[in-house]
Amino acid sequence: MDKFTTLTGIAAPMPLINVDTDMIIPKQFLKTIKRSGLGVNLFDEMRYDDDGKEIPDFVLNKAQYRDAEILVAGDNFGCGSSREHAPWAIKDFGIRCVIAPSFADIFYNNCFKNGILPIALPQEQVDVLMKDAEKGSNARMMVDLEAQTVTSSDGEVFHFELDSFKKHCLMNGLDDIGLTMEKAASIDSFEAAAAQARPWV
């Protein structure tokens, strides 16, 4: 998993509340178990019409937001089913950070396991960042995970709270497998001792 330390990038504004995981990645795209290739179908039903053509008014189809790495969203982002394909699609598109007033718990935790930083801020602060994102590609936000801050293009700084363990995992690029492999020496030692003590197993 990629490490997350600092991120300076374009932020796309999506002032919608209750964006559920089916809106993020519709059910017909859940057949794959690969984490790559889903970015093209992120927000599929909002991005494309029935003929598969891009809807020009959708934020990620606009030229200034095609390379967005930050998404500023509305309350209760990621609600609905627990599909892990939702953060897969977000990451594959190129978004590494989602800022919202609140997140659904399962989606929030899945983000950390996939190298995405979800930041919960008070509504009034999200409103400021939403307006900043609406400026387009010339307005770049900076996210500093070590300092736990988001800085707007105007230099306004907002501090966010984050569980220290989740912070450690993101900064060191550790998913569940990575965390296990940190203990590889101890696991090998245990297995060797167990094999000697119970060779019949």
Image: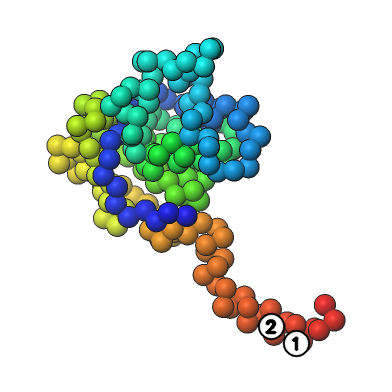
Q: Mark 2 — residue?
A: 192
Q: How is the image coloured?
A: rainbow
Mark 2 in CB contact with mark 1 (< 8 angstroms): yes
Q: Residue furthest bottom?
A: 196
Q: Quadrant of residue 69?
A: top left
What is the three-letter code of the residue carrying label 2?
Answer: Ala
Horizontal and vertical percent position of residue 20: 51, 28
**Tag of residue 134:** none
What number of labels is visible? 2
Q: Give above or below for 146 relative to 68.
A: below
Horizontal and vertical percent position of residue 103: 45, 37
Residue shown at 76%/87% (left/top)? 197
Q: Quadrant of residue 91?
A: top left
What is the crowding at mark 1: few (fewer than 14 residues within 10 Å), some, or many (at least 20)? few
Q: Quadrant of residue 58?
A: top left
Disc 2 to disc 1, how far (Cα)? 6 Å
